[in-house]
Amino acid sequence: MINRRHIRVKVMQSVYAMLQSHNDDIIREEKFLKHSILKMYDLYVLNLQLLVEVQKLAAKKMALSKKKILATKEDLRPNTKFIDNKIINTIAESISVEGYIELNNLNNWELDKEYVRIIFEELQKSDLYKNYLETEEESFKADKAFVIDFFKEIIAPNDKLGAFFEDTMISWVDDIPFVNTWVVKTLSKQKENSTFFLSSLYKDKDDEDFVSQLFRKTVLKHKEYEQDITEKTPNWETDRIADIDMILIKMSLTEFMNFPSIPTRVTINEYIEISKDYSTEKSSYFINGVLDKISRDFIENKRIVKIGRGLL
């Protein structure tokens, strides 16, 4: 499921796009933001389904080998360990996965079978695959460990597959690392003899509401926040502050004053970490300094009111 940090990243990107385009249609931009998050779920499902499609291709090639005129003993009695893999079979049999694919018309692997072949060929060449077929252990635990390694070592780092995902939807460029982690967590949690269910997109209704509230309140108050920022950065003209830094500080102020259950220090730390990935080398220090000054002032003037002990 999507976590709060990635929600903040998605909101940051939408706020940036809206302010850069000078567009004031907040309803349309919010719809695009939620659509972007929903499409991230498509990426999650496509990665899981890719495991099934690779297994199907292996079974198809195995069946064709048996029909050879000069079929070898290996062709006639192949090692079926991969096509019998228990965790991939649970995904293949999952009504949750099948229903989502049909409902959202996720036919990517039918239209672009080339990527299924690329992954299968990479798997066949790997020591991981050879060792898996040769090991005598036949258990759900061994099957799960293999599938997790298959995803982490072959699917996730594949450049051609990554380029395909990026070409399919531009917002997936930043989503891929998060979704890869999400897939591994989903596989790791699967238990033997259990039906496979897709993870929820949001942890709960609070997280889903957090998306809209953080976006709307930041956009609607961003001019007001600029004044607060200007007062705490007297040696900086606002146009000298990096655009992303300014947005991250504004989002922090939104959290300070509108989300009473989020500790101030948690907010500051979250945006410092995001700045390390999305802004300049020195942004984290700058943002930390500005937010520290603003938070102290807001607390003193009771503009920050948090619920619960130790939240300031």
Image (cartoon, rainbow, N blue to C red):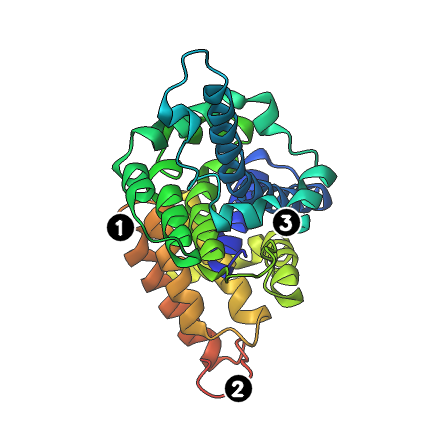
User: Is the C terminus in the top left, top right, bottom left or bottom right quadrant?
Assistant: bottom left
Of residue 122 and residue 65, the one placed in the foreground of this image is 65
- What is the quadrant of residue 39 in the picture? top right
Mark 3 or mark 2: which comes first in sequence? 3
- What is the quadrant of residue 73 in the picture? top left
Label 2, secondary structure: give it.
Answer: loop
Of residue 233 and residue 44, the one placed in the foreground of this image is 44
Residue drawn 59% across the image and 64% down it: 203
Please provide percent x and percent y for residue 307: 56, 83
Mark 3 or mark 1: which comes first in sequence? 3
The residue to which callout 2 is attached is 308
Label count reads 3
Q: Is residue 69 above or below residue 221?
A: above
Residue drawn 60% across the image and 36% down it: 22
User: Is the N terminus in the top left, top right, bottom left or bottom right quadrant?
Assistant: bottom right
Q: Disc 3 and disc 2: Cα gap in Å?
A: 42 Å
Of residue 29 and residue 86, the one placed in the foreground of this image is 86
Residue, far top? 69
Label 3, secondary structure: give it.
Answer: loop
Residue, far bottom? 309
Label 1, secondary structure: give it.
Answer: loop
The residue to which callout 3 is attached is 94
Q: Is residue 174 above or below residue 290?
A: above
Q: Is residue 67 above or below residue 279?
A: above
- Amino acid at the residue labelled 1: Lys
- Amino acid at the residue labelled 3: Ser
Q: Mark 3 against mark 2, which lies toward the viewer? A: 3
Please provide percent x and percent y for residue 205: 67, 65
Please rate how many residues cluster around mark 3, counting C-alpha atoms within 10 Å: few if below 14, some from 14 to 19, many from 20: some
Q: Is residue 56 visible?
A: yes
Residue drawn 46% across the image and 46% down it: 85
The residue to which callout 1 is attached is 282
